[in-house]
Amino acid sequence: MKVMSRTEDITPKPLSRARARWELVWGHFRRSKPAIFGAFLLIVIVFSAFFAPFLGLRSITEMNLTNIVAPPSWEHPLGTDSYGRDMLARIVFGSRVSLFVGFVAVGLAMFFGIPLGLSAGYLKGRFDNALMRIMDAFFTFPPILLAIALVGILGSSVKTVIIALTIVYTPRFARIVRSSTLAVSEFEYVTASRAIGCGSIGIIFKHILPNVSGPIIVQATVTYAYAILTEASLSFLGLGVQPPTPSWGLMLSEARMYIEDSPWYPIFPGLAIVVSVLAINLFGDGLRDALDPKRQRLE
């Protein structure tokens, strides 16, 4: 009896369905070198932004008018701006603004868009038609033009940029969640749940939402990259973050008149935007491939 109990104790228990699925996703993801590289870059960017006050950087507001637009040196690794402020410190602290605005805007867009998409895809009928026509109205405007119009109406600040981006990107999540919900709601296990009397709320949260999480995650990474670009564009036009708060787009706007004489000045904030968006896109592409149901069925 003791031997049997020991055998039972050491016998591995089968993985739950959800855990097995995510281990399969991780297996696909880690085999993609570009995705791992993007994840590494993203971790470095987020780490430097989060711990920026503890990295021993120079003050982002300290000016030295005798050393303006200085080239990279040992004292200022990325040079100085038109007010003699250290570019390295301002780029690192500027990442906090861009990442924060993108994260909050995407989070709010998901908060509003996911319930709308779930409701439209599950209830269908008139509610679905009416909601999708409203979403289509937002899609008729290019995102950047709609964001510019909203910020122009609401005023220029970090808060209004977040509100504008939330309004711009909520229809994206509503549309993709709605289309995924329409497909999942026709599956046999959803039909069986309805037949045995399960409530709509239980079916949505227990059966539908977990099965549409893949497209939501992928859309979130793609939208995050777009949000960073849009925030930089708005700040470049003077409609986003206002000085003296550092922002990559604002730095590009200030540096454009020096592009011929001091090319390093606009290159570094532009490179920060490129690297951040590249990292998010590589990470998102890896997630998209790893969460692809067709690839998972081949395993």
Image: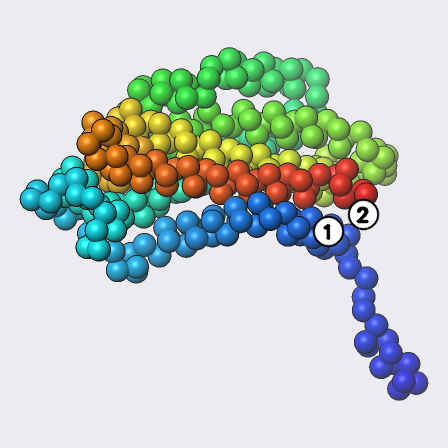
Mark 1 or mark 2, which is nearer the start of the sequence? 1
Q: Nearer the viewer, residue 156 or 113?
A: 156
Taking 14 as reference, is 147 above or below it?
above
Q: Is residue 251 visible?
A: no
Residue on which disc 2 sits: 299
Q: Viewed as shown, does residue 281 lie left or right of 119?
A: left
Residue at horizontal 65 percent and vertical 15 percent from the top? 129
Please state the horizontal and vertical placement of residue 191, each as a whole percent of the image: 83, 33
Residue at horizontal 21 percent and vertical 51 percent from the top? 73
In which quadrant will I find the N terminus? bottom right
Residue at the limit of the structure toward the left, as seen here: 66
Q: Amino acid at mark 2?
A: Glu
How crowded is the residue under tag 2: few (<14 C-alpha within 10 Å), some, or many (20+)?
few
Please state the horizontal and vertical placement of residue 163, each as a whole percent of the image: 39, 30
Spatial separation of the CA atoms under disc 2 and disc 1: 8 Å
Please state the horizontal and vertical placement of residue 209, each as a whole percent of the image: 68, 39
For residue 235, which quarter of the picture? top left
Q: Nearer the viewer, residue 211 or 231?
A: 231
Please state the horizontal and vertical placement of residue 281, each as a whole percent of the image: 53, 38
Q: Are the residues tagged 2 and 1 within 8 Å (C-beta)?
A: yes
Residue on which disc 1 sits: 24
Residue at the limit of the structure toward the bottom, as seen here: 2
